[in-house]
Amino acid sequence: MSTFTLYLISLSIILLYTTTVFLLALKKKDNSIIDIAYGAGFIVTAWMLAILKLMTAPLTPYSFLILILITIWGTRLSYRIYQKNKGKPEDFRYKNWRDLWMKKGLPYFLVRAYLQIFVLQGIVISIVLLPFTLSIITSPMTSYWIVLGLIVWCIGFFFEAVGDRQLDRFIKDNNRVGTILKTGLWKYTRHPNYFGESTMWVGIALISLTASSSTIVILSPILITYLLLFVSGIPMLEKKWDGNPEWEEYKKKTSAFFPMPTQEK
């Protein structure tokens, strides 16, 4: 099976998945459920590809390792977002889009929401998932790439999981000081969870580097990092804090992405 054919299969699976989520979002009138479905989408697609592979040949050990790492990451992420959003209205980002697009009528809203939120999310997932998709058809790798990739993934998982945990505890703390979390990992980066997610995909890409023809897997961490830094991650999240004096002071002292010592002014 060619690389392109396998990618098309992966893309078809995830688009069927995101279309199903879109129909559910219409019923609930809440497009932000795509955030919950995001991590699960990787799991569903990866396991479907694994099952298709197992029909003809066993998975290699490193393919199975990548599958397990994706499952751990995706399960934690989807469950965490579900717990965070449970019982809450549609996230402000999607609510703003809904209000804007509905001004042009329901048909426009349906097409725009489906393409920009659900189809685009599916395409992103299919590209970020390339390290696993290509690992199915590439030759075995040398062990040091596995070790290096696994170490990098563990570092990323630590930053994302611990960063999220610290943030959740801060939000629930009725005795917290201020409105901005500035301790723990958040003392060294304004977005330890985003840094962690990017780092995890770097680790998975390293594990997947099996042959020169598979270097296309670097598109995975490049894309996810670009989106977090310049599109749907940091810019959208930080925009709502603009003008907050506490935030502006924190922003001056703290690195946006890479963990760095606090810059005392």
Image (cartoon, rainbow, N blue to C red):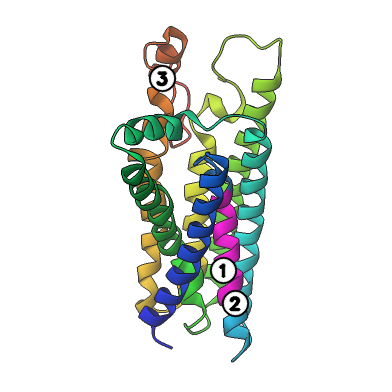
Q: Nearer the viewer, mark 3 or mark 1?
A: 1
Q: CA distance from mark 2 to mark 1?
A: 6 Å
Q: Residue flagged by tag 3: what amino acid is it? A: Lys
Residue 62 seen from this side: no
Relative image position of residue 101 (x, y in whole percent): 33, 36
Out of 144 and 251, give the one closest to the viewer: 251
Please state the total of marks drawn on the protein image: 3
Q: CA distance from mark 2 to mark 3?
A: 43 Å
Q: Nearer the viewer, mark 2 or mark 3?
A: 2
| Residue 126 in which image quadrant | bottom left
Check whether the beta carbons of the residues at disc 2 and disc 1 lie within 8 A of each other.
yes
Residue identified by numbered label 1: 46
Q: Earlier in the sequence, mark 3 or mark 1?
A: 1
| Residue 52 in which image quadrant | bottom right
Q: Residue flagged by tag 1: what amino acid is it? A: Ala
Quadrant assignment for the C terminus: top left
Out of 229 and 212, give the one closest to the viewer: 229
Residue identified by numbered label 3: 251
Residue identified by numbered label 2: 50
